Image (cartoon, helix red, strand yellow):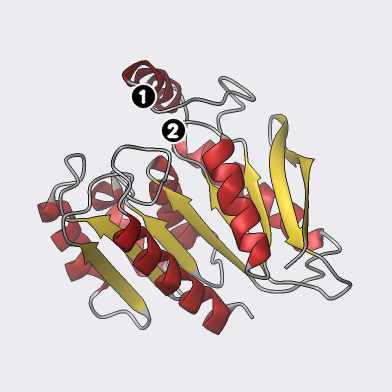
Amino acid sequence: MATSSEHVKITSAGGTFDGYFAAPGGDGAAPGVVVIQEIFGVNSHIRSVVERLAGEGYAALAPDLFWRVRPGIELGYTPDDIAQGREIRGKLNDDEVVEDVRATFEVLGKRPECQGRKLGITGFCWGGFVTYLAACRLSPAATASYYGGGIAGFLDEADKIDAPILFHFGEKDARIPLSDVEQVKEKVAGKHDAQVFVYPEAEHGFHCDQRGSYQEAAARQAWARSMELFGKHLK
C-alpha cells in the first residue's frame, strides 16, 4: 500500500511540539492510531512503526513526548542511551504527558486523512505505560500496550478502562517481574475485551528489531494480535 509521511506540529498546554505522521494513500478516511515512543524518543524505530501502521491502513501519529525536557532527541540502544532516556523520563510529569497525548488525539482526529474516524493507541516500553494511562483517562477506541513498566503501580485506575485493550509482556523481561504481570491479569480479568499475553522466552523490547532483545516470533505474534484488535474495533 502506498503511504505518505510528514512531520507535524501538536499544541498542548505549555507549548507546541513535533509529531511524526504517516497515512495510507488515496482519498478515503482511515482510522487513526497514536504511537507512543520508548525512552529513546521518536527515533527511526518508532517512525518505522508509524509507517508500518500506515501500510496496514491506519493514519498514525507519534508525538515527541520528551519535548518538555529534550525536544527532538533521538537515542539508540547503548547503555549510555538508556541512561539518557531514563534521566529524561524521570523529569517528566505523568499528568502532563497524558495531556500531551490528549492533544495528539485531537490533532490526529482532525486530520483530513482521519475525518472523525475511530482512534486507537499503542506504545512500547515507557510508551506502553503511557498507553495504559491513556486507556484509563482518555477513552481511546482500542489499546495495545507493549511491555509497559510501572503499570502495576497504577492499577487503581484500571476500572476506568471502557474499551478493548491488549497487554503484551515478555516472560524473561528483567524490568517487569511476572508478579507485576499477574497483578495486571487479576485486575482486568473481569473486563470485557481485556487480554494479557505473555510471550515465552521474550525479553524487554522484544518488538524492536534494532535491539539485541528482539525476538521475531514474539514480535510477529504480538503485532498480529494488535492488528486484529485494531481491525475489529477501529475499522
Nearer to the camera, 148 or 78: 78
What numbered label is drawn on residue 39?
2
Tell me the crowding category of disc 1: few under 14, some 14 to 19, or many 20 or more residues within 10 angstroms, Cα based: some
User: Which mark sits nearer the N-terminus, 1 or 2?
Assistant: 2
Q: Which residue is mark 1?
A: 82
Q: Is residue 108 visible?
A: yes
Say whether residue 47 is left or right of residue 40. right
Q: Quadrant of residue 132?
A: bottom left
In the rendered structure, are the residues bearing label 1 and label 2 in contact, judged by CB atoms less than 8 Å apart?
yes
Residue 122 screen position, x and y as percent: 50, 57
Residue kind at label 1, given as amino acid type: Ile
Q: Amino acid at mark 2?
A: Ile
- 48 and 17: which is toward the camera: 48
Instruction: Work out whether residue 99 can be spotted.
Output: no
Q: Using residue 140 as the reference point, say whether residue 24 is left or right of it.
A: right
Q: Secondary structure at mark 2?
A: loop
Cα–Cα span, label 1 and label 2: 7 Å
